[in-house]
Amino acid sequence: MKVIDAITVTSTLVQRQQIQFDEANGLIMAVGDLNLTADYTFGNDCYLFAGMGDVHIHAREDVSGKNNYKEDFTTARMALRNGGLCHAGDMPNNPVPPVDEKSYEAKVKLAEKVEGEIWAYAGIGPETRPLSYSVPYKVYMGPSIGELFFKDLPTLEHTLEHYRGENVSFHCEDPLILEAHKSATHHHDRRPVEAEVIATKDALMMIQKFNLKGKLCHYSSGEGLRLIREARSQGVEVQIEVTPQHLFYDIEHILEKDLKVFQMNPPIRHEYDRSALLMALKNGEIDFLATDHAPHTHEEKEKGTSGLTGLDTFGPFVTWLIDDQGFDPKLIAKVAAENPGDFFNQFLPSWQKISKVYSNMGDGVGYLKPGYRANFTVLNMKRPLTVDRQNLKTKVGHSPFMGVTFPGSVEALFIGGQKV
Protein backbone atom coordinates (compact mmCIF):
# COMPACT_ATOMS: atom_id res chain seq x y z
CA MET A 1 0.00 0.00 0.00
CA LYS A 2 1.06 3.59 -0.69
CA VAL A 3 -0.26 6.87 0.66
CA ILE A 4 -0.39 10.35 -0.90
CA ASP A 5 -0.88 13.51 1.17
CA ALA A 6 -2.00 16.46 -0.96
CA ILE A 7 -4.53 19.21 -1.56
CA THR A 8 -7.11 17.28 -3.55
CA VAL A 9 -9.63 18.77 -5.96
CA THR A 10 -12.97 17.28 -6.93
CA SER A 11 -16.02 18.91 -8.49
CA THR A 12 -17.39 19.61 -5.00
CA LEU A 13 -14.44 20.19 -2.67
CA VAL A 14 -10.85 21.41 -2.37
CA GLN A 15 -9.15 20.07 0.76
CA ARG A 16 -5.96 18.53 2.07
CA GLN A 17 -6.40 14.84 2.69
CA GLN A 18 -4.76 11.47 2.17
CA ILE A 19 -5.32 8.84 -0.50
CA GLN A 20 -4.34 5.24 0.13
CA PHE A 21 -3.93 3.02 -2.91
CA ASP A 22 -2.77 -0.49 -3.75
CA GLU A 23 0.14 -0.61 -6.18
CA ALA A 24 -0.60 -4.27 -6.91
CA ASN A 25 -4.16 -3.87 -8.21
CA GLY A 26 -3.85 -0.18 -9.12
CA LEU A 27 -6.97 0.88 -7.21
CA ILE A 28 -7.80 3.51 -4.58
CA MET A 29 -8.47 1.90 -1.21
CA ALA A 30 -9.34 4.85 1.06
CA VAL A 31 -9.64 8.64 0.95
CA GLY A 32 -9.86 11.12 3.83
CA ASP A 33 -8.18 12.05 7.10
CA LEU A 34 -6.38 8.72 7.35
CA ASN A 35 -3.55 9.71 9.72
CA LEU A 36 -1.14 7.44 7.86
CA THR A 37 2.52 7.95 7.06
CA ALA A 38 2.65 9.43 3.56
CA ASP A 39 4.89 7.98 0.87
CA TYR A 40 4.29 11.08 -1.29
CA THR A 41 3.59 14.56 0.08
CA PHE A 42 2.77 17.49 -2.18
CA GLY A 43 2.96 21.04 -0.83
CA ASN A 44 0.45 23.87 -0.85
CA ASP A 45 1.54 24.99 -4.33
CA CYS A 46 0.13 21.77 -5.79
CA TYR A 47 -3.35 20.53 -6.63
CA LEU A 48 -4.05 16.80 -6.98
CA PHE A 49 -6.89 15.84 -9.35
CA ALA A 50 -8.22 12.44 -10.32
CA GLY A 51 -6.30 11.43 -13.44
CA MET A 52 -7.28 13.83 -16.22
CA GLY A 53 -8.60 12.60 -19.57
CA ASP A 54 -8.88 13.93 -23.11
CA VAL A 55 -11.91 12.66 -25.03
CA HIS A 56 -10.63 13.79 -28.45
CA ILE A 57 -7.21 13.04 -29.96
CA HIS A 58 -5.73 11.70 -33.19
CA ALA A 59 -2.98 9.22 -32.31
CA ARG A 60 -2.70 8.37 -36.05
CA GLU A 61 -1.84 4.66 -35.73
CA ASP A 62 -3.96 2.02 -37.45
CA VAL A 63 -3.40 -1.37 -39.08
CA SER A 64 -2.07 0.24 -42.25
CA GLY A 65 0.70 2.10 -40.42
CA LYS A 66 0.53 4.80 -43.11
CA ASN A 67 0.39 7.71 -40.68
CA ASN A 68 2.76 6.39 -38.03
CA TYR A 69 5.38 8.87 -39.23
CA LYS A 70 3.24 11.63 -37.67
CA GLU A 71 2.41 9.89 -34.39
CA ASP A 72 1.71 6.40 -33.08
CA PHE A 73 0.20 5.03 -29.89
CA THR A 74 3.57 4.92 -28.14
CA THR A 75 4.54 8.54 -28.86
CA ALA A 76 0.97 9.74 -28.24
CA ARG A 77 1.13 8.11 -24.80
CA MET A 78 4.44 9.86 -24.12
CA ALA A 79 2.84 13.19 -25.02
CA LEU A 80 -0.33 12.62 -22.99
CA ARG A 81 1.68 11.64 -19.91
CA ASN A 82 3.89 14.67 -20.43
CA GLY A 83 0.78 16.84 -20.34
CA GLY A 84 -0.55 15.28 -17.14
CA LEU A 85 -3.18 13.09 -18.78
CA CYS A 86 -4.02 9.50 -17.87
CA HIS A 87 -6.26 8.51 -20.78
CA ALA A 88 -7.44 9.78 -24.17
CA GLY A 89 -9.95 8.82 -26.86
CA ASP A 90 -8.61 8.29 -30.38
CA MET A 91 -10.70 9.38 -33.36
CA PRO A 92 -11.44 7.04 -36.29
CA ASN A 93 -10.44 9.05 -39.38
CA ASN A 94 -7.57 6.68 -40.14
CA PRO A 95 -6.50 5.36 -43.56
CA VAL A 96 -8.24 2.13 -42.45
CA PRO A 97 -11.10 3.47 -40.32
CA PRO A 98 -12.62 1.32 -37.54
CA VAL A 99 -16.22 1.08 -38.76
CA ASP A 100 -17.23 -2.49 -37.92
CA GLU A 101 -16.36 -5.07 -35.27
CA LYS A 102 -13.41 -6.54 -37.15
CA SER A 103 -11.73 -3.21 -37.90
CA TYR A 104 -12.59 -1.75 -34.48
CA GLU A 105 -11.17 -4.70 -32.58
CA ALA A 106 -8.05 -4.67 -34.76
CA LYS A 107 -7.42 -1.07 -33.71
CA VAL A 108 -8.11 -1.84 -30.05
CA LYS A 109 -5.62 -4.70 -30.31
CA LEU A 110 -2.96 -2.28 -31.62
CA ALA A 111 -3.62 0.05 -28.69
CA GLU A 112 -3.12 -2.69 -26.10
CA LYS A 113 0.55 -1.76 -25.95
CA VAL A 114 -0.43 1.48 -24.18
CA GLU A 115 -2.51 -0.46 -21.65
CA GLY A 116 -5.85 1.28 -22.01
CA GLU A 117 -4.47 4.80 -21.77
CA ILE A 118 -5.63 5.38 -25.37
CA TRP A 119 -9.07 4.08 -26.27
CA ALA A 120 -10.92 4.13 -29.58
CA TYR A 121 -13.97 5.65 -31.23
CA ALA A 122 -15.68 3.79 -34.05
CA GLY A 123 -16.42 5.71 -37.23
CA ILE A 124 -19.75 6.36 -38.90
CA GLY A 125 -19.77 6.66 -42.68
CA PRO A 126 -22.26 6.16 -45.51
CA GLU A 127 -23.83 2.69 -45.14
CA THR A 128 -22.09 1.78 -41.84
CA ARG A 129 -24.05 0.12 -39.04
CA PRO A 130 -23.63 -0.01 -35.25
CA LEU A 131 -21.44 -2.61 -33.59
CA SER A 132 -23.09 -5.31 -31.49
CA TYR A 133 -21.71 -3.79 -28.28
CA SER A 134 -21.64 -0.24 -26.94
CA VAL A 135 -18.78 2.01 -28.12
CA PRO A 136 -18.36 5.74 -28.74
CA TYR A 137 -18.95 6.81 -32.36
CA LYS A 138 -17.70 9.78 -34.36
CA VAL A 139 -19.36 11.29 -37.41
CA TYR A 140 -17.85 13.89 -39.74
CA MET A 141 -20.67 15.98 -41.18
CA GLY A 142 -18.34 17.43 -43.83
CA PRO A 143 -14.83 16.87 -45.19
CA SER A 144 -11.89 17.23 -42.83
CA ILE A 145 -8.73 15.07 -42.63
CA GLY A 146 -9.31 11.61 -44.10
CA GLU A 147 -12.07 10.09 -46.22
CA LEU A 148 -14.61 9.25 -43.51
CA PHE A 149 -17.25 11.96 -43.98
CA PHE A 150 -20.67 12.77 -45.41
CA LYS A 151 -21.36 14.97 -48.42
CA ASP A 152 -24.99 15.79 -47.70
CA LEU A 153 -27.55 15.77 -44.92
CA PRO A 154 -30.02 13.20 -46.38
CA THR A 155 -27.31 10.53 -46.54
CA LEU A 156 -26.20 11.30 -42.99
CA GLU A 157 -29.76 11.23 -41.69
CA HIS A 158 -30.45 7.90 -43.42
CA THR A 159 -27.35 6.40 -41.82
CA LEU A 160 -27.96 7.78 -38.31
CA GLU A 161 -31.45 6.28 -38.30
CA HIS A 162 -29.69 2.96 -37.62
CA TYR A 163 -27.77 4.40 -34.63
CA ARG A 164 -30.77 5.22 -32.44
CA GLY A 165 -29.80 5.56 -28.79
CA GLU A 166 -26.04 5.36 -29.46
CA ASN A 167 -23.34 7.73 -28.24
CA VAL A 168 -22.38 9.85 -31.25
CA SER A 169 -19.88 12.72 -31.41
CA PHE A 170 -20.33 15.23 -34.24
CA HIS A 171 -17.75 17.25 -36.16
CA CYS A 172 -20.07 20.15 -37.03
CA GLU A 173 -19.22 21.71 -40.40
CA ASP A 174 -21.80 21.80 -43.16
CA PRO A 175 -20.41 20.30 -46.42
CA LEU A 176 -22.43 22.58 -48.72
CA ILE A 177 -21.19 25.73 -46.99
CA LEU A 178 -17.61 24.43 -47.15
CA GLU A 179 -18.00 23.75 -50.86
CA ALA A 180 -19.42 27.22 -51.49
CA HIS A 181 -16.46 28.90 -49.74
CA LYS A 182 -13.63 26.63 -50.90
CA SER A 183 -12.05 29.33 -53.09
CA ALA A 184 -11.64 31.90 -50.30
CA THR A 185 -8.10 33.10 -49.66
CA HIS A 186 -7.82 32.24 -45.97
CA HIS A 187 -8.61 28.99 -44.19
CA HIS A 188 -10.91 30.65 -41.65
CA ASP A 189 -12.92 32.12 -44.54
CA ARG A 190 -13.09 28.76 -46.34
CA ARG A 191 -14.62 27.24 -43.19
CA PRO A 192 -16.80 30.11 -41.89
CA VAL A 193 -18.80 30.23 -38.66
CA GLU A 194 -21.92 29.75 -40.79
CA ALA A 195 -20.78 26.20 -41.61
CA GLU A 196 -20.61 25.29 -37.92
CA VAL A 197 -23.88 27.00 -37.04
CA ILE A 198 -25.88 25.27 -39.79
CA ALA A 199 -24.29 21.91 -38.97
CA THR A 200 -25.10 22.48 -35.29
CA LYS A 201 -28.78 22.92 -36.12
CA ASP A 202 -28.72 19.68 -38.09
CA ALA A 203 -26.79 17.78 -35.41
CA LEU A 204 -29.18 18.90 -32.67
CA MET A 205 -32.14 17.89 -34.83
CA MET A 206 -30.71 14.40 -35.37
CA ILE A 207 -29.71 13.97 -31.72
CA GLN A 208 -33.32 14.64 -30.76
CA LYS A 209 -34.88 12.68 -33.62
CA PHE A 210 -32.83 9.52 -33.06
CA ASN A 211 -32.52 9.81 -29.27
CA LEU A 212 -28.74 9.95 -29.53
CA LYS A 213 -26.33 10.62 -26.69
CA GLY A 214 -24.82 13.51 -28.58
CA LYS A 215 -21.55 15.37 -28.22
CA LEU A 216 -20.38 18.32 -30.33
CA CYS A 217 -16.63 18.17 -30.89
CA HIS A 218 -14.08 21.03 -30.62
CA TYR A 219 -16.78 23.70 -30.57
CA SER A 220 -15.61 27.09 -31.84
CA SER A 221 -18.65 29.34 -32.45
CA GLY A 222 -20.16 31.77 -29.99
CA GLU A 223 -23.21 32.07 -32.21
CA GLY A 224 -23.74 28.32 -32.14
CA LEU A 225 -23.81 28.27 -28.34
CA ARG A 226 -27.15 30.06 -28.48
CA LEU A 227 -28.64 27.17 -30.48
CA ILE A 228 -27.28 24.66 -28.00
CA ARG A 229 -28.78 26.55 -25.07
CA GLU A 230 -32.16 26.63 -26.80
CA ALA A 231 -32.00 22.91 -27.53
CA ARG A 232 -31.05 22.08 -23.95
CA SER A 233 -33.93 24.21 -22.66
CA GLN A 234 -36.22 22.00 -24.76
CA GLY A 235 -34.83 18.80 -23.25
CA VAL A 236 -32.23 17.84 -25.85
CA GLU A 237 -29.29 16.12 -24.11
CA VAL A 238 -26.08 17.24 -25.77
CA GLN A 239 -22.53 17.67 -24.51
CA ILE A 240 -19.85 20.05 -25.80
CA GLU A 241 -16.06 19.95 -26.13
CA VAL A 242 -13.79 22.97 -26.38
CA THR A 243 -10.07 23.01 -27.21
CA PRO A 244 -7.31 25.00 -25.50
CA GLN A 245 -6.53 26.53 -28.92
CA HIS A 246 -10.01 28.01 -29.30
CA LEU A 247 -9.88 29.37 -25.73
CA PHE A 248 -6.40 30.92 -25.98
CA TYR A 249 -6.18 32.31 -29.52
CA ASP A 250 -8.30 34.43 -31.83
CA ILE A 251 -7.76 35.26 -35.48
CA GLU A 252 -7.33 38.99 -34.79
CA HIS A 253 -4.05 38.31 -32.98
CA ILE A 254 -2.49 35.78 -35.38
CA LEU A 255 -0.11 37.28 -37.93
CA GLU A 256 -0.70 36.62 -41.63
CA LYS A 257 2.59 34.72 -41.87
CA ASP A 258 1.54 32.37 -39.05
CA LEU A 259 -1.93 31.44 -40.31
CA LYS A 260 -0.81 28.03 -41.60
CA VAL A 261 0.87 27.27 -38.29
CA PHE A 262 -2.45 27.73 -36.48
CA GLN A 263 -4.64 26.04 -39.11
CA MET A 264 -7.17 23.53 -37.78
CA ASN A 265 -10.74 22.37 -38.41
CA PRO A 266 -12.84 24.17 -37.33
CA PRO A 267 -10.58 27.23 -37.52
CA ILE A 268 -9.45 29.57 -34.78
CA ARG A 269 -12.29 32.13 -34.63
CA HIS A 270 -12.72 35.77 -33.68
CA GLU A 271 -12.27 37.41 -30.29
CA TYR A 272 -16.05 37.36 -29.82
CA ASP A 273 -16.10 33.58 -30.20
CA ARG A 274 -13.11 33.06 -27.90
CA SER A 275 -14.67 35.19 -25.17
CA ALA A 276 -18.02 33.45 -25.53
CA LEU A 277 -16.38 30.02 -25.22
CA LEU A 278 -14.39 31.03 -22.13
CA MET A 279 -17.54 32.36 -20.48
CA ALA A 280 -19.55 29.25 -21.40
CA LEU A 281 -16.84 27.02 -19.95
CA LYS A 282 -16.65 29.09 -16.77
CA ASN A 283 -20.45 28.93 -16.44
CA GLY A 284 -20.46 25.15 -16.64
CA GLU A 285 -22.11 24.98 -20.06
CA ILE A 286 -19.21 23.15 -21.72
CA ASP A 287 -18.56 19.58 -20.63
CA PHE A 288 -15.06 18.70 -21.82
CA LEU A 289 -11.69 20.35 -22.26
CA ALA A 290 -10.36 18.34 -25.21
CA THR A 291 -7.25 19.02 -27.26
CA ASP A 292 -8.15 17.62 -30.71
CA HIS A 293 -4.43 16.66 -30.74
CA ALA A 294 -3.83 16.28 -34.49
CA PRO A 295 -0.11 15.95 -35.29
CA HIS A 296 1.32 16.73 -38.73
CA THR A 297 4.93 17.22 -39.74
CA HIS A 298 6.48 20.68 -40.16
CA GLU A 299 6.45 20.14 -43.92
CA GLU A 300 2.74 19.31 -43.91
CA LYS A 301 1.92 22.34 -41.79
CA GLU A 302 3.85 24.60 -44.19
CA LYS A 303 1.66 23.27 -47.00
CA GLY A 304 -1.49 24.15 -45.05
CA THR A 305 -2.54 20.83 -43.51
CA SER A 306 -5.13 21.32 -40.78
CA GLY A 307 -4.46 20.10 -37.25
CA LEU A 308 -2.69 21.21 -34.08
CA THR A 309 -0.99 19.26 -31.30
CA GLY A 310 -2.13 19.63 -27.70
CA LEU A 311 -1.39 16.66 -25.46
CA ASP A 312 1.96 17.91 -24.14
CA THR A 313 0.51 21.21 -22.94
CA PHE A 314 -2.78 20.07 -21.38
CA GLY A 315 -1.79 20.37 -17.71
CA PRO A 316 0.12 23.65 -18.10
CA PHE A 317 -2.84 25.11 -19.99
CA VAL A 318 -5.12 24.15 -17.11
CA THR A 319 -2.94 26.20 -14.76
CA TRP A 320 -3.52 29.19 -17.09
CA LEU A 321 -7.27 28.74 -16.81
CA ILE A 322 -7.06 28.69 -13.01
CA ASP A 323 -4.38 31.33 -12.44
CA ASP A 324 -4.87 33.77 -15.32
CA GLN A 325 -8.56 33.36 -16.13
CA GLY A 326 -9.87 32.81 -12.61
CA PHE A 327 -11.43 29.39 -13.15
CA ASP A 328 -12.55 27.50 -10.06
CA PRO A 329 -10.33 24.40 -9.65
CA LYS A 330 -13.49 22.42 -8.85
CA LEU A 331 -14.82 23.19 -12.35
CA ILE A 332 -11.52 21.98 -13.83
CA ALA A 333 -11.97 18.71 -11.92
CA LYS A 334 -15.36 18.37 -13.59
CA VAL A 335 -14.40 19.07 -17.22
CA ALA A 336 -10.90 17.54 -17.20
CA ALA A 337 -11.29 14.52 -14.90
CA GLU A 338 -14.83 13.55 -13.89
CA ASN A 339 -16.70 14.15 -17.15
CA PRO A 340 -14.02 12.38 -19.23
CA GLY A 341 -14.15 9.61 -16.62
CA ASP A 342 -17.92 9.27 -16.98
CA PHE A 343 -17.52 9.13 -20.75
CA PHE A 344 -14.86 6.40 -20.51
CA ASN A 345 -16.58 4.37 -17.80
CA GLN A 346 -19.80 3.80 -19.72
CA PHE A 347 -17.93 1.75 -22.34
CA LEU A 348 -15.73 -0.18 -19.92
CA PRO A 349 -17.93 -3.33 -19.96
CA SER A 350 -17.64 -3.52 -23.77
CA TRP A 351 -13.88 -2.97 -23.78
CA GLN A 352 -13.37 -5.57 -21.07
CA LYS A 353 -14.97 -8.16 -23.36
CA ILE A 354 -12.60 -7.50 -26.26
CA SER A 355 -9.30 -6.52 -24.57
CA LYS A 356 -7.46 -7.78 -21.51
CA VAL A 357 -5.95 -4.36 -20.70
CA TYR A 358 -9.26 -3.09 -19.30
CA SER A 359 -9.60 -5.88 -16.73
CA ASN A 360 -7.89 -3.96 -13.90
CA MET A 361 -9.85 -0.70 -14.04
CA GLY A 362 -12.05 -1.32 -11.00
CA ASP A 363 -15.05 1.03 -11.04
CA GLY A 364 -13.35 3.10 -13.72
CA VAL A 365 -11.46 6.39 -13.90
CA GLY A 366 -11.99 10.06 -13.13
CA TYR A 367 -12.82 10.01 -9.41
CA LEU A 368 -10.96 10.15 -6.10
CA LYS A 369 -13.04 7.39 -4.55
CA PRO A 370 -12.33 3.89 -3.23
CA GLY A 371 -12.64 1.29 -5.97
CA TYR A 372 -11.61 3.65 -8.77
CA ARG A 373 -8.31 3.38 -10.60
CA ALA A 374 -5.43 5.09 -8.81
CA ASN A 375 -4.87 7.71 -11.50
CA PHE A 376 -3.74 11.12 -10.22
CA THR A 377 -2.73 14.34 -11.97
CA VAL A 378 -0.70 16.70 -9.76
CA LEU A 379 -0.24 20.27 -10.99
CA ASN A 380 2.25 22.70 -9.49
CA MET A 381 0.57 26.09 -9.70
CA LYS A 382 3.77 28.01 -8.94
CA ARG A 383 6.30 26.38 -11.26
CA PRO A 384 6.02 28.10 -14.66
CA LEU A 385 6.68 26.31 -17.93
CA THR A 386 7.76 27.93 -21.20
CA VAL A 387 6.87 25.64 -24.09
CA ASP A 388 9.77 24.77 -26.37
CA ARG A 389 10.88 21.87 -28.54
CA GLN A 390 12.85 20.27 -25.70
CA ASN A 391 9.82 19.76 -23.46
CA LEU A 392 7.56 18.18 -26.09
CA LYS A 393 7.12 14.43 -26.49
CA THR A 394 4.88 14.35 -29.57
CA LYS A 395 6.71 12.84 -32.53
CA VAL A 396 6.20 15.91 -34.73
CA GLY A 397 7.91 18.18 -32.22
CA HIS A 398 5.80 21.32 -32.44
CA SER A 399 2.99 23.03 -30.56
CA PRO A 400 0.62 25.97 -31.13
CA PHE A 401 1.83 27.18 -27.72
CA MET A 402 5.50 27.35 -28.69
CA GLY A 403 7.14 30.14 -26.67
CA VAL A 404 4.13 30.61 -24.37
CA THR A 405 4.89 30.65 -20.64
CA PHE A 406 2.17 29.01 -18.54
CA PRO A 407 1.97 29.86 -14.82
CA GLY A 408 2.24 26.24 -13.70
CA SER A 409 3.23 22.78 -14.85
CA VAL A 410 2.80 19.07 -14.22
CA GLU A 411 4.38 18.08 -10.90
CA ALA A 412 3.60 14.35 -10.96
CA LEU A 413 1.45 11.73 -12.63
CA PHE A 414 0.25 8.38 -11.29
CA ILE A 415 -1.38 5.75 -13.50
CA GLY A 416 -2.75 2.57 -11.94
CA GLY A 417 -0.90 3.35 -8.73
CA GLN A 418 2.46 3.77 -10.45
CA LYS A 419 4.27 7.10 -10.49
CA VAL A 420 5.32 7.67 -14.11
Image: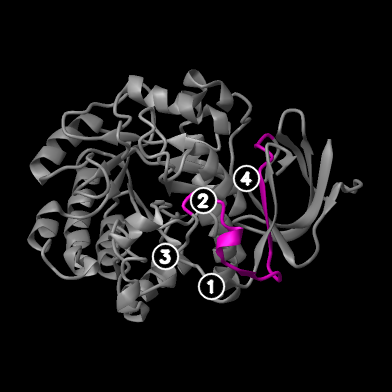
State whether residue 247 is above or below residue 128: below
In the image, 230 versus 91, the foreground residue is: 91
Q: Is residue 59 left or right of residue 46?
A: left
Name the element at disc 2: loop
Dot in front, 2 or 1: 2
- The residue tagged 3 is 245
Q: Which residue sits at x=37%, y=55%?
A: 240
**Of label 4 and label 2, which has the lower sequence position?**
4
Which tag, 4 or 3, sits closer to the chain's start? 3
Query: How far apart are the alpha carbons under marks 4 and 1?
Result: 31 Å
Q: Are marks 4 and 3 in contact (CB under 8 Å)?
A: no
Q: Amino acid at mark 1?
A: Val
Per the rendering, the mark at residue 394 is 2
Q: Is residue 239 left or right of residue 112?
A: left
Q: Tell which tag, 4 or 2, sits nearer the viewer.
A: 2
Q: Position of residue 47 (x, y in %)?
A: 70, 61
The CA span between labels 1 and 3 is 12 Å
Q: Which mark is residue 404?
A: 1
Q: Earlier in the sequence, mark 3 or mark 2?
A: 3
Give the CA separation, mark 3 to mark 2: 17 Å
Q: Amino acid at mark 2?
A: Thr
Look at the image and say whether residue 262 sits in the magenta stretch.
no
134, above or below 207, in the image: above
Residue 420 appears anywhere in the view: yes
In the image, which is nearer the foreground, mark 4 or mark 3? 3
Q: Residues within 10 Å of mark 3 (few under 14, many from 20)?
A: many
| Element assignment for label 4 | loop
Q: Residue 26: x, y in percent?
A: 71, 33
Q: Which residues are magenta?
A: 371-396
Depth check: give the residue in front, 334 or 297: 297
Task: State if disc 1 and disc 2 touch (CB < 8 Å).
Answer: no
